[in-house]
Image (spheres, grey):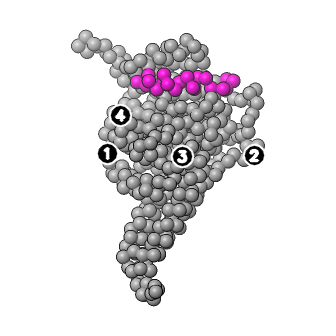
Amino acid sequence: MLDFNIFIADTHAIILLTIAFVAFVCLGLYYGLYHMRVGLYKRKAGQGGDPQAGSLPPVSVVLTAHNDAEWLKENLVYLLEQDYPDFEVVVVDYLSQDDTASVLKLLKEYYPHLKVVPFVGNISVREGVASHEDVNLFQGKKYPLSIGIKSAKNDILMLADPECTPKNLLWLRGMVKGYTESKTKIVLGYCGVKRKKTLLGALQQYDSLAYGAHYLGSALMGHPYTGSGRNLSYRRSFFFKQGAFISHYDVADGSDDLFIYQNADRDNTNICIDNDACLTVEPKKTFAQWREYRLHRVATRRRHSIGSRAAEQMLPVANIAFYVAATLMAMHGTVALIAAVALGVLKWAWQIVCFSRLTRKFDGGYIHFAAPLLELYFIVANTFLILSPLHSNRKFRK
């Protein structure tokens, strides 16, 4: 028989059980408030329905391209062929040295609503070879993106990257539904990673779902703090009224993160994650490429408030506390071992249930069954990511 008296008399076991239980409750709330909430989200009846073609506002899609000829060949047609009555696609060709200019020139012949903005810089000649010198003194993507936004003729902007693919030709209609009221200035969208039957593909897919759930869930709770430039919309007039990127031009990253962090609030921000409104991207081919992308994603977090950063760390801290406390508690006898296992099973079961709502929402397949194991990987990986220096070409990134 199990002797509960020994367990109750073990002060260390009780303390560890308390820590594990508090962490368990925090994790349960997190999965419910973020994963489950986003997965179950449905637009309210009558809220941003399917307006008639005549009532759809004109839209400008803005992209920045740098040596993206292959992606433009593959994806730009899907943007140009959108089922939408009045829109343009603005592409800033930023110092490309591949066939980007040729691809855009060819597409321009067939699609008059494509506007190409060349960003060629200054031409210099060294050792008899002509080359373009970058005049982007601010570094990063913000300056060429600002040029694209300034070149756009419509007030509602849709931002994406050349490697993004719409799920169908209704992306613009889907995202425009987010502008339900005149006070809406920002609409946050979602861009998922396409499924690949590899470990690297699964990690990227999980990371995309978990990260998306956090910033979309935060927005649903009235605290929008960031977005993804792979699928983001805001009003052109609002962009310039708020000073564009001027306050953080000194930071190469953050064309999406810092602008949203500084200007989004519960009243002016909406989310749009209907199936038609989502985009997808191919997973990175190597761990090094993916790690570089993730480093850039967290590079601007130092500009966030202490409260925002603390909220982002709630999940890893609670996870570490849970697993450490449960592991140590399991060493304090049979009763403690059973309690630790029971908490672990309940935690994993609830996590899988909540994450399954995300995979259903965003066509994630069955990756939710591996969520507990993948989460363990990110507890370690994210710790090293935060401590890692960022070494890269500072002139342009996505």
Q: Of marks 3 and 4, which one's residue comes earlier in the chain?
A: 3
Q: Which residues are magenta?
A: 67-86
Q: Residue at x 43, y 53 (%)?
A: 374
Residue 82, magenta (yes or no): yes
Q: Residue at x 54, y 54 (%)?
A: 355
Kind of residue at disc 4: Arg
Where is residue 314? Give x, y as percent. 47, 60
Q: Does 297 sit above or below residue 176?
A: below
Label 1 secondary element: loop
**In the image: residue 49, left or right of residue 269:** right
**In the image: residue 131, left or right of residue 217:** left
Q: CA distance from mark 1 to mark 4?
A: 13 Å
Q: Residue at x 41, y 83 (%)?
A: 11
Label 3 secondary element: loop
Q: Does 214 sit above or below residue 254?
A: below
Q: CA distance from mark 2 to mark 1?
A: 47 Å
Q: Of marks 4 and 2, which one's residue comes earlier in the chain?
A: 2
Tell me, for residue 394, which label it has, or none. Answer: 4
Question: Which residue bears the numbered disc 2?
Answer: 45
Q: Residue extending furthest front?
A: 1
Q: Does 74 sit above or below residue 387?
A: above
Q: How many marks?
A: 4
Q: Residue at x 43, y 78 (%)?
A: 336
Mark 2 or 3: the one toward you = 3
Residue 79, magenta (yes or no): yes
Q: Are marks 2 and 1 in contact (CB under 8 Å)?
A: no
Name the foreground residue: 205 vs 269: 205
Tell me, for residue 365, which label it has, or none. Answer: 3
Q: Characterize the local packing of mark 4: few (<14), some (14-19) or many (20 or more) Cα atoms within 10 angstroms.
A: some
